[in-house]
Amino acid sequence: MSRLIIFLYGIVSYVVFFVTFLYAIGFVSGLTVPKTIDSGTAGGIAEALIVNLLLMSLFAIQHSVMARKQFKQWWTQFVPKPVERSTYVLLASLALVLLFWQWRPIPAVVWHVADPQVAMAITGLSFVGWLLVLTSTFLINHFELFGLHQVANNLAGREMPAPRFRTPLYYKFVRHPIYLGFIIAFWAAPTMTGGHLLFAAVTTAYILVGIWLEERDLVDLFGDDYRRYRDRVSMLLPWRKSAPGETSDGRIAGVGRRP
């Protein structure tokens, strides 16, 4: 019964994540959802900056701290190991839901593309970014990344397989196609408002910090295999070789592990 409950918990956590991911596309793109990055009553600029930065900081802290090896070793003393990943995914999703709900718009226009065809092309590019994010997760192990593999194995009484270093498709050209997809999705906007610019800039900065943190974990996990991969393949720009000493995230990048 406990294994079944753990499995159902993993399913619920995944559903919450997937709905949140779909909502995020509409939130950033300004399409089809009740609350977007530019909708709502605009207040003072100072209030908007403080609230929005706090919301993004809450997500960044939760997302980074809970992914660290030391935290997981402590955390799994209190929660069953098979649901550690599902709990991480659930809390990250709830942090995003809070951000969507409480986000304060900053409507000042930074740039606007008036030509409808060009604007449509830029919007299309943003969806290419989201598609890159989703397909990249399936190239490694989408269901392990979001906790389903762990709870399914636990239900069947099987151990999780050891992590393997691999670099399928996109990962042969860029180490972090998931992060690259997010950057494209956030910045490809035919109308860029102050609020959208704040969101894109802060999340891009967070990605770069997260890359540095995760790189250390991957070097610890895979050693020289990952160092050689890092030297051979670019961090975010396809087909540009890494500079000596350049670091990147990699827990996702081609190793079938979590971000």
Image (cartoon, rainbow, N blue to C red):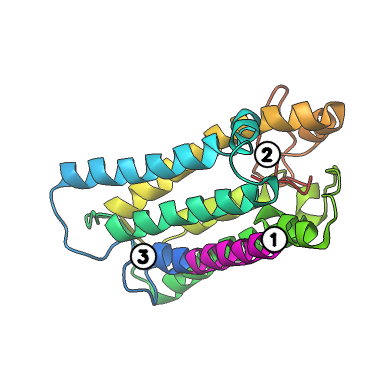
Q: Position of residue 199 (x, y in %)?
A: 38, 49
- Residue under the image location 45 percent in, 75 percent down: 117
Task: Specify whether 249 is left or right of 220.
Answer: left
Which residue is disc 1 drawn over? 148
Query: Which quarter of the image is occupied by the C terminus?
Result: top right
Question: Can residue 247 be seen at all in this image of the molecule?
Answer: no
- Residue under the image location 37 percent in, 69 percent down: 30
Mark drawn on residue 113: 3
Inter-mark Cα distance, 1 to 3: 42 Å
Disc 3 element: loop
Task: Specify whether 234 is left or right of 86.
Answer: right
Which residue is disc 2 drawn over? 235
Of labels 3 and 2, earlier in sequence is 3
Task: Specify whether 155 is left or right of 73.
Answer: right
Please, is residue 10 above or below residue 163 in the view? Answer: below
The image quarter containing residue 50 is top left
Task: Specify whether 73 is left or right of 106.
Answer: right
Q: Position of residue 10 (x, y in %)?
A: 63, 61
- Residue under the image location 69 percent in, 58 percent down: 137
Q: Position of residue 191 (x, y in %)?
A: 34, 62
Please, is residue 237 above or below residue 209 in the view? Answer: below
Q: Comparing marks 3 and 2, which lies closer to the viewer?
A: 2
Circle 2 packing at 10 Å, graded few (<14), some (14-19), many (20+), is many
Disc 1 element: helix
Asked if the stretch drawn in magenta spans residue 58, the answer is: no
- Are discs 1 and 3 less than 8 Å apart at CB? no
Of labels 2 and 1, earlier in sequence is 1
